């Protein structure tokens, strides 16, 4: 009986995960299979029947009719203040009005009109019973609370969204919230789940590595960080990873981070100084001196560069000559 139940639970979770991607016919077929299997599990019938009913209530409800208007066009163009202005004048009916309000909520959020966004999301949660609408309202509320650094409230909102429909965005947001709350074990589980679904997200692998490192799983953390280097594109994310690697003595990897930034975003004082400093810590004098020359030419009065040179001067006589140059 236990094996049957475990098998049923696995099939149910897989069905729930792919529900929004299935056709109505596939949804109905899968429901019939779950019902037939559940019939053989008499001791667990009550719990299983409730889960089946949850899916049946969602049958035909997970797909929302698109709402397109002048206001949504402004939204897609990221003209969020103008989008709010237009959307508030539009008067669709029924479900489309709920979608209009969702657009208003997210446009207000992205335009930093947080009071307006909060008011809109809370109103939607009060008046709408449609699971997809409520899901996105909870997501919006969670994003708003994250901006306000109300992490515990954001976690509660994202969990409410996940109970309605589990999406990769919600799983990622929960992972990041738990990470900032320093609940690293929980953060790791959500981020691992997310990375399995979205294996091309370098930033997620970076945070996953941070969680694994905090939990003492250093070899696994190292593998996650190595993966993230090959995936990350943003300068900010690569700099964060470089600093982490440098702090923990992984200077070779820090160099790779800085070289990727240089390749993707060009030279800057931070990048050239980072390359010079990490090459120096690897005792690679030739490359260290090369990049120190470049960064001194770019920013000769930078105090942080001077501090690095003064520190190295005790063991590298060549540094004194470099500063004279």
Image (spheres, helix red, strand yellow):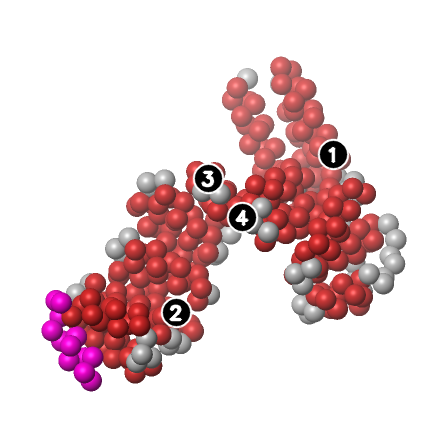
Marks 2/4: CA distance? Answer: 25 Å
Q: Which residue is mark 4?
A: 172
Residue 307 position, x and y percent, is 25, 69
Marks 1/4: CA distance? Answer: 27 Å
Q: Residue furthest top?
A: 43
Q: Residue at x 69, y 59 (%)?
A: 113
* Residue 287 lies in quadrant: bottom left
Q: Which residue is mark 1?
A: 56
Q: Earlier in the sequence, mark 3 or mark 4?
A: 4
- Image: magenta residue range: 314-325
**In the rendered image, which quarter contains the C terminus?**
bottom left
| Image position of 55 with respect to 248: above or below | above
Q: Earlier in the sequence, mark 2 or mark 3?
A: 3
Can residue 233 be seen by looking at this rendering? Answer: no
Q: Residue at x 35, y 59 (%)?
A: 243
Marks 3/1: CA distance? Answer: 35 Å
| Image position of 185 with respect to 108: above or below | above
Q: Which residue is mark 2?
A: 261
Mark 1 residue element: helix
Q: Earlier in the sequence, mark 1 or mark 2?
A: 1
Q: Residue at x 67, y 39 (%)?
A: 164
Mark 2 residue element: helix
Residue 35 position, x and y percent, is 69, 26
Count neighbours of disc 4 (C-alpha within 10 A) and say few if under 14, some if 14 to 19, many if 20 or more: many
């Amino acid at each position: 009986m236990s094996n049957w139940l475990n098998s049923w639970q696995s099939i149910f979770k897989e069905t729930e995960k792919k529900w929004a991607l299935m056709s109505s016919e596939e949804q109905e077929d899968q429901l019939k299979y779950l019902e037939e299997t559940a019939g053989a599990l008499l001791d667990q019938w009550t719990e299983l029947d409730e889960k089946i009913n949850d899916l049946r209530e969602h049958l035909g409800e997970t797909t929302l009719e698109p709402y397109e208007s002048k206001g949504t066009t402004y939204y897609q163009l990221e003209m969020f203040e103008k989008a709010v202005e237009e959307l508030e004048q539009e008067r669709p009916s029924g479900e489309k009005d709920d979608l209009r309000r969702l657009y208003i909520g997210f446009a207000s959020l992205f335009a930093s009109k947080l009071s307006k966004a909060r008011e809109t999301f809370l109103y939607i949660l009060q008046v709408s019973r449609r699971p997809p609408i409520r899901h996105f309202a909870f997501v919006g509320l969670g994003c708003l609370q994250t901006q306000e650094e109300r992490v515990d409230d954001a976690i509660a909102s994202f969990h409410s969204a996940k109970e309605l429909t589990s999406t990769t965005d919600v799983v990622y947001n929960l992972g990041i919230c738990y990470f900032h709350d320093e609940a690293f074990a929980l953060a790791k589980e959500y981020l691992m789940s997310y990375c399995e679904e979205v294996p091309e997200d370098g930033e997620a692998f970076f945070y996953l590595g941070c969680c694994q490192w905090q939990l003492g799983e250093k070899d696994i953390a190292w593998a996650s960080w190595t993966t993230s280097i090959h995936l990350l594109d943003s300068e900010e994310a690569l700099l964060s990873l470089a600093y982490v690697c440098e702090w923990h003595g992984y200077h070779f990897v820090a160099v790779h981070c800085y070289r990727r930034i240089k390749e993707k975003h060009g030279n800057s004082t931070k990048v050239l100084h980072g390359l010079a400093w990490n090459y120096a810590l690897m005792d690679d004098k030739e490359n260290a001196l090369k990049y120190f020359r470049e960064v001194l030419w770019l920013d000769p009065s930078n105090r942080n560069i001077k501090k690095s040179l003064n520190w190295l001067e005790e063991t590298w006589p060549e540094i004194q000559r470099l500063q004279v140059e």
